[in-house]
Amino acid sequence: MWNAGHIEKAKKRIAELVKAVNYILEVRDARAPFATGAYEREKLFRGKKSVIVLNKSDIADELVTENWVDFYKSRGERVIVTKKGDRSKKLLKVIFGEASNVRALIVGLPNVGKSSFTNRLKGRRSTRVGAVPGITRGVQWIQINDNVRIIDTPGILYSELFSRELAAKLLLVGSIVVEKVNDWEIQELAFEILKRRYPGTVRDIAGDVESFDEFLEVFGKKRGFIQKGGIVDKEKASHKFFHDVYNGKLGRMSFEDPEEVFRV
Ligand SMILES: Nc1nc2c(ncn2[C@@H]2O[C@H](COP(=O)(O)OP(=O)(O)O)[C@@H](O)[C@H]2O)c(=O)[nH]1
Ligand SMILES: [Mg+2]
Protein backbone atom coordinates (compact mmCIF):
# COMPACT_ATOMS: atom_id res chain seq x y z
CA MET A 1 0.00 0.00 0.00
CA TRP A 2 2.91 2.34 0.74
CA ASN A 3 5.98 2.44 -1.42
CA ALA A 4 8.89 0.60 0.23
CA GLY A 5 11.43 3.24 -0.78
CA HIS A 6 9.37 5.99 0.81
CA ILE A 7 8.99 4.02 3.99
CA GLU A 8 12.71 3.41 4.35
CA LYS A 9 13.39 7.09 3.74
CA ALA A 10 10.75 8.15 6.26
CA LYS A 11 12.12 5.77 8.90
CA LYS A 12 15.66 7.06 8.43
CA ARG A 13 14.43 10.60 8.69
CA ILE A 14 12.55 9.92 11.89
CA ALA A 15 15.51 8.06 13.42
CA GLU A 16 17.61 11.12 12.63
CA LEU A 17 15.11 13.51 14.16
CA VAL A 18 14.73 11.35 17.28
CA LYS A 19 18.42 11.91 17.99
CA ALA A 20 17.89 15.67 18.13
CA VAL A 21 15.14 15.63 20.78
CA ASN A 22 14.47 14.63 24.38
CA TYR A 23 10.68 14.15 24.10
CA ILE A 24 8.51 12.26 21.63
CA LEU A 25 4.87 13.27 21.34
CA GLU A 26 3.17 10.37 19.71
CA VAL A 27 -0.07 11.54 18.15
CA ARG A 28 -2.73 8.89 17.67
CA ASP A 29 -6.37 8.99 16.67
CA ALA A 30 -8.46 8.61 19.83
CA ARG A 31 -10.96 6.56 17.83
CA ALA A 32 -8.37 3.84 17.17
CA PRO A 33 -5.36 4.27 19.48
CA PHE A 34 -4.02 0.79 18.91
CA ALA A 35 -4.30 0.80 15.11
CA THR A 36 -2.74 4.25 14.87
CA GLY A 37 0.10 3.30 17.21
CA ALA A 38 1.04 -0.23 16.22
CA TYR A 39 4.37 0.59 14.60
CA GLU A 40 7.82 -0.30 15.94
CA ARG A 41 7.76 2.41 18.56
CA GLU A 42 10.21 0.85 21.02
CA LYS A 43 12.77 0.61 18.29
CA LEU A 44 12.10 4.06 16.91
CA PHE A 45 11.93 5.94 20.19
CA ARG A 46 14.51 4.05 22.19
CA GLY A 47 15.17 5.60 25.55
CA LYS A 48 13.33 8.89 24.95
CA LYS A 49 10.53 10.20 27.12
CA SER A 50 7.35 9.65 25.17
CA VAL A 51 3.79 10.81 25.61
CA ILE A 52 0.81 9.22 23.87
CA VAL A 53 -1.42 12.00 22.56
CA LEU A 54 -4.98 10.86 21.88
CA ASN A 55 -6.21 13.43 19.37
CA LYS A 56 -9.64 14.06 17.85
CA SER A 57 -11.28 13.26 21.17
CA ASP A 58 -14.14 15.56 20.10
CA ILE A 59 -15.28 12.94 17.59
CA ALA A 60 -14.41 9.82 19.62
CA ASP A 61 -16.68 8.04 22.07
CA GLU A 62 -15.90 9.68 25.40
CA LEU A 63 -16.21 6.58 27.57
CA VAL A 64 -14.05 4.51 25.27
CA THR A 65 -11.38 7.21 25.35
CA GLU A 66 -11.46 7.09 29.16
CA ASN A 67 -10.90 3.34 28.97
CA TRP A 68 -7.89 3.83 26.74
CA VAL A 69 -6.43 6.40 29.13
CA ASP A 70 -6.83 4.01 32.07
CA PHE A 71 -5.36 1.21 30.03
CA TYR A 72 -2.23 3.10 28.98
CA LYS A 73 -1.75 4.47 32.50
CA SER A 74 -1.96 0.96 33.91
CA ARG A 75 0.88 0.05 31.59
CA GLY A 76 3.00 2.89 32.88
CA GLU A 77 2.64 5.04 29.77
CA ARG A 78 2.07 8.77 29.83
CA VAL A 79 -1.08 9.68 27.96
CA ILE A 80 -3.02 12.87 27.30
CA VAL A 81 -6.29 13.55 25.50
CA THR A 82 -6.71 16.49 23.16
CA LYS A 83 -9.00 17.96 20.55
CA LYS A 84 -9.55 20.88 18.23
CA GLY A 85 -9.70 24.11 20.18
CA ASP A 86 -7.52 23.07 23.16
CA ARG A 87 -5.38 25.95 24.38
CA SER A 88 -1.62 26.02 24.07
CA LYS A 89 -0.90 27.09 27.62
CA LYS A 90 -2.90 24.31 29.21
CA LEU A 91 -1.48 21.64 26.89
CA LEU A 92 2.10 22.73 27.52
CA LYS A 93 1.53 22.56 31.26
CA VAL A 94 -0.06 19.12 31.12
CA ILE A 95 2.57 17.67 28.82
CA PHE A 96 5.81 19.23 30.01
CA GLY A 97 5.01 20.51 33.51
CA GLU A 98 8.05 22.37 34.80
CA ALA A 99 10.58 20.58 32.57
CA SER A 100 13.25 22.80 31.10
CA ASN A 101 15.06 22.74 27.78
CA VAL A 102 12.38 20.66 26.10
CA ARG A 103 13.04 19.59 22.53
CA ALA A 104 10.05 17.57 21.32
CA LEU A 105 9.32 15.64 18.16
CA ILE A 106 5.74 15.15 17.00
CA VAL A 107 5.22 11.79 15.30
CA GLY A 108 2.32 9.71 14.09
CA LEU A 109 0.58 8.21 11.06
CA PRO A 110 -0.82 10.33 8.25
CA ASN A 111 -3.91 12.37 9.16
CA VAL A 112 -3.93 11.68 12.88
CA GLY A 113 -3.55 15.44 13.35
CA LYS A 114 0.18 16.06 13.84
CA SER A 115 0.18 19.44 12.12
CA SER A 116 -3.04 20.52 13.81
CA PHE A 117 -1.63 19.51 17.18
CA THR A 118 1.62 21.34 16.46
CA ASN A 119 -0.35 24.48 15.64
CA ARG A 120 -2.41 24.01 18.77
CA LEU A 121 0.78 23.88 20.87
CA LYS A 122 2.17 26.89 19.06
CA GLY A 123 -0.71 29.16 19.87
CA ARG A 124 -0.10 32.59 18.36
CA ARG A 125 3.26 33.72 19.56
CA SER A 126 5.79 31.12 18.50
CA THR A 127 8.19 31.44 15.61
CA ARG A 128 10.29 29.16 13.46
CA VAL A 129 13.93 29.32 14.38
CA GLY A 130 16.45 27.84 12.06
CA ALA A 131 17.47 24.40 11.01
CA VAL A 132 17.97 21.39 13.25
CA PRO A 133 21.71 20.64 13.27
CA GLY A 134 22.72 17.55 11.37
CA ILE A 135 19.25 17.02 9.93
CA THR A 136 18.01 16.74 6.38
CA ARG A 137 17.15 20.05 4.80
CA GLY A 138 13.83 21.70 5.43
CA VAL A 139 13.34 20.68 9.06
CA GLN A 140 13.00 23.60 11.43
CA TRP A 141 12.51 24.04 15.12
CA ILE A 142 9.42 25.87 16.23
CA GLN A 143 10.16 27.84 19.36
CA ILE A 144 7.09 27.76 21.58
CA ASN A 145 8.49 29.57 24.61
CA ASP A 146 11.80 29.94 26.46
CA ASN A 147 11.69 26.32 27.48
CA VAL A 148 10.06 24.43 24.64
CA ARG A 149 10.87 23.87 20.99
CA ILE A 150 9.23 21.30 18.74
CA ILE A 151 9.46 19.67 15.30
CA ASP A 152 6.53 18.30 13.29
CA THR A 153 7.44 15.29 11.11
CA PRO A 154 5.91 14.29 7.80
CA GLY A 155 4.62 11.11 9.46
CA ILE A 156 5.32 7.49 10.13
CA LEU A 157 4.20 4.83 7.68
CA TYR A 158 3.72 1.14 8.27
CA SER A 159 6.03 -1.05 6.26
CA GLU A 160 3.41 -3.75 6.49
CA LEU A 161 -0.27 -3.63 7.30
CA PHE A 162 -0.10 -6.80 9.32
CA SER A 163 -3.81 -7.51 9.32
CA ARG A 164 -6.90 -6.71 7.31
CA GLU A 165 -8.50 -5.46 10.49
CA LEU A 166 -5.70 -2.94 10.95
CA ALA A 167 -6.12 -1.68 7.39
CA ALA A 168 -9.89 -1.40 7.91
CA LYS A 169 -9.47 0.64 11.09
CA LEU A 170 -6.96 2.96 9.45
CA LEU A 171 -9.50 3.43 6.71
CA LEU A 172 -12.21 4.30 9.26
CA VAL A 173 -10.10 7.07 10.82
CA GLY A 174 -8.77 8.35 7.49
CA SER A 175 -5.14 7.45 8.01
CA ILE A 176 -5.49 5.52 4.79
CA VAL A 177 -7.77 7.40 2.42
CA VAL A 178 -10.55 5.52 0.71
CA GLU A 179 -9.53 6.73 -2.76
CA LYS A 180 -6.35 4.67 -2.35
CA VAL A 181 -8.00 1.50 -1.08
CA ASN A 182 -8.79 -0.50 -4.16
CA ASP A 183 -9.46 -3.57 -2.08
CA TRP A 184 -13.23 -3.67 -1.82
CA GLU A 185 -13.07 -6.27 0.95
CA ILE A 186 -11.21 -3.82 3.19
CA GLN A 187 -13.99 -1.30 2.68
CA GLU A 188 -16.55 -3.97 3.49
CA LEU A 189 -14.67 -5.00 6.61
CA ALA A 190 -14.43 -1.37 7.75
CA PHE A 191 -18.18 -1.02 7.32
CA GLU A 192 -18.75 -4.25 9.29
CA ILE A 193 -16.60 -2.96 12.18
CA LEU A 194 -18.58 0.27 12.26
CA LYS A 195 -21.92 -1.52 12.00
CA ARG A 196 -21.06 -3.98 14.76
CA ARG A 197 -20.28 -1.11 17.11
CA TYR A 198 -22.91 1.37 15.95
CA PRO A 199 -25.81 -0.60 14.47
CA GLY A 200 -28.21 2.25 15.31
CA THR A 201 -26.28 4.74 13.20
CA VAL A 202 -26.34 2.42 10.20
CA ARG A 203 -30.04 1.72 10.72
CA ASP A 204 -30.85 5.43 10.96
CA ILE A 205 -29.19 6.03 7.60
CA ALA A 206 -30.25 2.98 5.64
CA GLY A 207 -32.66 0.80 7.61
CA ASP A 208 -31.94 -2.89 8.09
CA VAL A 209 -29.27 -3.66 5.55
CA GLU A 210 -27.37 -6.93 5.30
CA SER A 211 -24.27 -5.80 3.45
CA PHE A 212 -22.15 -2.76 2.62
CA ASP A 213 -23.35 -3.07 -0.96
CA GLU A 214 -26.96 -2.80 0.18
CA PHE A 215 -26.05 0.07 2.48
CA LEU A 216 -24.42 2.01 -0.37
CA GLU A 217 -27.50 1.47 -2.49
CA VAL A 218 -29.59 3.37 0.06
CA PHE A 219 -26.92 5.87 1.11
CA GLY A 220 -26.04 6.67 -2.52
CA LYS A 221 -29.67 7.29 -3.43
CA LYS A 222 -30.19 9.51 -0.42
CA ARG A 223 -27.11 11.58 -1.16
CA GLY A 224 -27.74 11.79 -4.89
CA PHE A 225 -24.86 9.69 -6.21
CA ILE A 226 -26.80 8.49 -9.22
CA GLN A 227 -25.39 7.60 -12.62
CA LYS A 228 -27.15 7.63 -15.96
CA GLY A 229 -29.99 5.15 -15.98
CA GLY A 230 -30.66 5.70 -12.30
CA ILE A 231 -27.94 3.39 -11.06
CA VAL A 232 -26.23 4.31 -7.80
CA ASP A 233 -22.55 5.21 -8.19
CA LYS A 234 -21.28 2.98 -5.39
CA GLU A 235 -17.70 4.11 -5.64
CA LYS A 236 -18.61 7.75 -5.13
CA ALA A 237 -21.10 6.82 -2.43
CA SER A 238 -18.45 4.82 -0.61
CA HIS A 239 -15.95 7.67 -0.81
CA LYS A 240 -18.51 10.05 0.63
CA PHE A 241 -19.44 7.62 3.38
CA PHE A 242 -15.86 7.14 4.55
CA HIS A 243 -15.13 10.86 4.40
CA ASP A 244 -18.15 11.45 6.62
CA VAL A 245 -16.79 8.86 9.04
CA TYR A 246 -13.28 10.43 9.08
CA ASN A 247 -14.72 13.79 9.90
CA GLY A 248 -17.07 12.59 12.61
CA LYS A 249 -20.13 13.61 10.60
CA LEU A 250 -22.00 10.44 11.57
CA GLY A 251 -21.52 11.22 15.24
CA ARG A 252 -18.88 10.41 17.83
CA MET A 253 -17.46 6.95 17.31
CA SER A 254 -14.58 4.78 18.49
CA PHE A 255 -13.50 1.73 16.57
CA GLU A 256 -11.64 -0.33 19.13
CA ASP A 257 -11.47 -1.01 22.88
CA PRO A 258 -8.41 -1.98 24.88
CA GLU A 259 -10.05 -5.25 26.03
CA GLU A 260 -10.71 -6.29 22.48
CA VAL A 261 -7.27 -5.44 21.15
CA PHE A 262 -5.17 -6.69 24.04
CA ARG A 263 -7.54 -9.32 25.47
CA VAL A 264 -6.88 -8.12 29.00
N1 LIG B 1 -12.50 16.76 14.67
C1 LIG B 1 -11.18 16.94 14.73
N2 LIG B 1 -10.46 16.97 13.58
C2 LIG B 1 -9.12 17.15 13.68
C3 LIG B 1 -8.47 17.29 14.94
N3 LIG B 1 -7.14 17.43 14.70
C4 LIG B 1 -6.98 17.40 13.35
N4 LIG B 1 -8.17 17.23 12.73
C5 LIG B 1 -8.39 17.14 11.26
O1 LIG B 1 -7.76 15.98 10.78
C6 LIG B 1 -7.23 16.19 9.46
C7 LIG B 1 -5.74 15.86 9.44
O2 LIG B 1 -5.03 16.76 10.27
P1 LIG B 1 -3.49 17.10 10.06
O3 LIG B 1 -3.08 17.98 11.20
O4 LIG B 1 -3.23 17.60 8.69
O5 LIG B 1 -2.84 15.64 10.21
P2 LIG B 1 -1.33 15.16 9.94
O6 LIG B 1 -1.32 14.51 8.61
O7 LIG B 1 -1.08 14.15 11.02
O8 LIG B 1 -0.45 16.35 10.06
C8 LIG B 1 -7.52 17.65 9.14
O9 LIG B 1 -8.69 17.68 8.36
C9 LIG B 1 -7.77 18.29 10.51
O10 LIG B 1 -8.61 19.40 10.46
C10 LIG B 1 -9.28 17.23 16.14
O11 LIG B 1 -8.80 17.32 17.28
N5 LIG B 1 -10.61 17.05 15.96
MG1 LIG C 1 0.99 17.14 8.73
Image (cartoon, grey):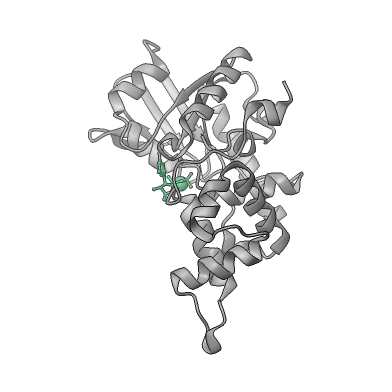
Instruction: Locate residue 135, reporting x and y percent.
Output: 52, 38
State which quarter of the image contains the N terminus: bottom right
Question: What residue occupies the far left of the structure in this picture?
Answer: 125
Question: What residue occupies the far front of the structure in this picture?
Answer: 208
- Please state if 148 lies on the left or on the right of 185 as rendered: left
Q: Splitting the image into four quadrants, where does ligand 1 fall? A: top left
Question: What residue occupies the far bottom of the structure in this picture?
Answer: 229
Instruction: Locate residue 109, reporting x and y percent.
Output: 57, 43
| Residue at image location 48% in from the left, 34% down from the top | 61
Question: What residue occupies the far right of the structure in this picture?
Answer: 162
| Residue at image location 41% in from the left, 17% down from the top | 96
Which one is nearer the viewer's eye here, 215 or 105?
215
| Residue at image location 74% in from the left, 25% down from the top | 263
Which one is nearer the viewer's eye here, 198 or 189?
198
Whether 102 is drawn above or below 227: the answer is: above
- Number of numbered discs visible in the structure rendering: 0
Whether 61 is drawn above or below 218: the answer is: above
Instruction: Locate residue 242, reporting x and y percent.
Output: 53, 57
Whether 190 is drawn above or below 224: the answer is: above
State which quarter of the image contains the C terminus: top right
| Residue at image location 72% in from the left, 53% down from the top | 4
Residue 236 visible in the snapshot: yes
- Please state if 237 lies on the left or on the right of 213 as rendered: left
